[in-house]
Amino acid sequence: MRLIAHGPMAAEVSKAGGIGFIGSGNDQSKLHEQLSDAQSLLSSCPPSQIIRGANDTLPIGVGFLNWGADLDVALPLLKKYRPAAVWLFAPHTIDTLVQWTRETRKATDNASKVWIQVCSVAEALDVARTCEPDVLVIQGVDAGGHGLHQGCSICALLPEAIDALQNAVQNREVKSMPTILAAGGVMEGRGLAAALALGAEGVVMGTRYLVADEAEIRQGYKDEVIRATDGGQTTVRTSVYDQLRRTTEWPKQYGGRSVTNQSYHDAINGMPLEENMRLYNEAAEMGDKGWGPQGRMTTYAGTAVGLVTRLQSAKNITKEVRAEARAVIKNLSDVMSSTGNL
Ligand SMILES: Cc1cc2nc3c(=O)[nH]c(=O)nc-3n(C[C@H](O)[C@H](O)[C@H](O)COP(=O)(O)O)c2cc1C
């Protein structure tokens, strides 16, 4: 998560048994500092907690937004720090993903695994064929932040994408099956268990970590994520906030899912962009009061935002979700054994 997930967030998630990502996004000017922070946080773990990445990698990932990320700045840093995973998303053309995949593997001697986030069956097939990623993150429309304007939930997307990929492997159009992860709408153990049932090997969570102690956002943003409920009605995927924040280099098929507020309502009611921007800049001066239903500040969050109810450390979120999923799966298996054949 660009500008939100830095070294401390990434290190804490990884220490808890997940893999945390630094959101480097489209601007790599702070990447050196972020990687160095994460490295020292991980190396100062007590011996009982020391975790190591495979192939001598740093056990975190780095996420890039490929419509703007700078490969020339990134490559020497990837070579130096060897993060366990490199995450790619949202290029203008697929050639950019091919180039980043090839160069990342070359720079890290294949040590860093390439994760690519996609939002449709067609994109999953294209990326699997052309990039041969280690991991495909399949993002459904419920996801917070950016994704395709037109999409569907992981409930529909994951099984169809998995079947299509398996067919493509059988027909030799795709060399091998990547690891599949699900993203979008998973906030807790029930969502994780459901994603596993749909065929994913794990999940990616964004919105839930917005309320982590380590998330570098204003308290007003965190409070609004905790306050918001009924995300199908109260969030929307839109380009309004990109216009207001001047992040308009996103390819046009992407929009950011945000909790709606006055900026959005005024935009759809016809307020001219310049006036909306003026009010947005005023709200930015109001600190934490800039958020909330009467506020104007961007509140990227997914449709399952109503399941996020309290502040927590990134470590506790990671551990809690895994423990909840184990309990759900055990309960399902108990139901199956007590009922026999359904
Ligand atoms: C505030 C926020 C910022 C995000 N930033 C990025 C990003 O920089 N790059 C990216 O690939 N995905 C980004 N995402 C999307 C996540 O990768 C992921 O698909 C999504 O958070 C999963 O859905 P969830 O929010 O329902 O957990 C962001 C999501 C949120 C909520």
Image (spheres, helix red, strand yellow):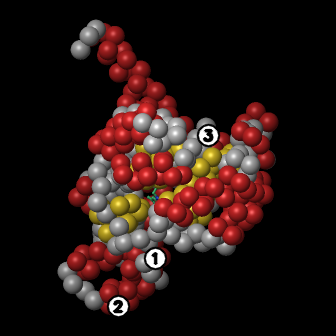
Is residue 197 left or right of 317 when viewed as pictured? left
Where does label 2 land, which residue? 274
Which residue corresponds to the image point at 26% horizontal and 10% vertical from the top-left? 341
Between 327 and 283, which is closer to the camera in this rendering?
327
- What is the crowding at mark 3: few (fewer than 14 residues within 10 Å), some, or many (at least 20)? some
- What is the crowding at mark 2: few (fewer than 14 residues within 10 Å), some, or many (at least 20)? few
**Ligand 1 within 8 angstroms of badge 2 C-beta:** no
**Image coordinates for residue 54, horizontal then vertical, percent:** 71, 39
**Image coordinates for residue 164, horizontal then vertical, percent:** 36, 40
Q: Secondary structure at mark 3?
A: loop
Where does label 3 land, which residue? 16
* Front tag of 1 and 2: 1
Separation (CA) of disc 2 from disc 3: 45 Å
**Image coordinates for residue 189, horizontal then vertical, percent:** 42, 36
Q: Earlier in the sequence, mark 1 or mark 2?
A: 1
Q: Earlier in the sequence, mark 1 or mark 3?
A: 3
* Front tag of 1 and 3: 1
Which residue corresponds to the image point at 34% horizontal and 10% vertical from the top-left? 337
**Disc 2 + disc 3, Cβ < 8 Å:** no
Separation (CA) of disc 1 from disc 3: 35 Å
Mark carried by residue 308: none
Is residue 235 left or right of 99 when viewed as pictured? left
Amino acid on which the number 3 mark rests in the picture: Ala
Amino acid on which the number 1 mark rests in the picture: Glu
**Image coordinates for residue 226, horizontal then vertical, percent:** 39, 55
Between 97 and 118, which is closer to the camera in this rendering?
97
Where does label 1 land, which residue? 249
Q: Is 256 drawn above or below residue 307 in the view shown?
A: below
